[in-house]
Image: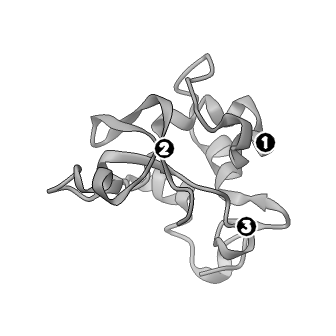
Amino acid sequence: MPDLVVLGVVSGEPERPEVAYLRDIVPATADLLQMAAPLAPMEVFRLAGRCAQDRCVHFNDSKCSLATRIVEMLPEVTAGLPPCTIRQTCRWYGQEGRAACHRCPQIVTLDVETGDLRQRVAGATMSPQDRPDGHC
């Protein structure tokens, strides 16, 4: 993915992950991602990139259905806005506003301990025909 950056580092418990946000924009270089070994980089880093729009299974009718599900289904985990290096260009913030930011610290790139709710938010338990965006 071009322009991929590290938004933060995953901390907390596997069943309750929390992102510790970085204060500066840090490109997700191959050397940096290798520092996660022996874990997968997506288990250690919260990654962010440009919205892929129509190339993404979560994009439908000019909106990110993932951002909508996050806001509708997950609880707020912070009252204030977390420090964020991408807010000005963030699809979720642009679409859902502060409500997305209040839930963002619990979202990780790869959730190895995904529970039922988190699977439903991610769209993992929907069959392709039941997905709101109609993609596999």
Marks 1 and 2: in contact by CB < 8 Å? no
Q: Nearer the viewer, residue 129 or 100?
A: 100
Q: Is residue 112 visible?
A: no
Residue count near mark 1 (Cα–Cα under 10 Å), binned few <14, some 14–19, many ≥20: few
Q: Is residue 89 left or right of residue 8?
A: right
Q: Amino acid at mark 2?
A: Ile
Any mark on residue 107, and which? 2
Q: Residue at x 73, y 36 (%)?
A: 88
x then y, percent, for residue 1: 53, 66
| Numbered disc 2: secondary structure | loop
Compared to 120, does 16 lie above or below? above
- The image's colour scheme reads one colour
Q: Is residue 3 visible?
A: yes
Q: Which residue is mark 1?
A: 94
- Residue 133 is drawn in which quadrant? bottom right
Q: Residue at x 57, y 79 (%)?
A: 127
Q: Which residue is mark 3?
A: 53
Task: First in sequence, mark 2 or 3: give its number.
Answer: 3
x then y, percent, for residue 13: 26, 35
Q: Nearer the viewer, residue 92 or 36?
A: 36
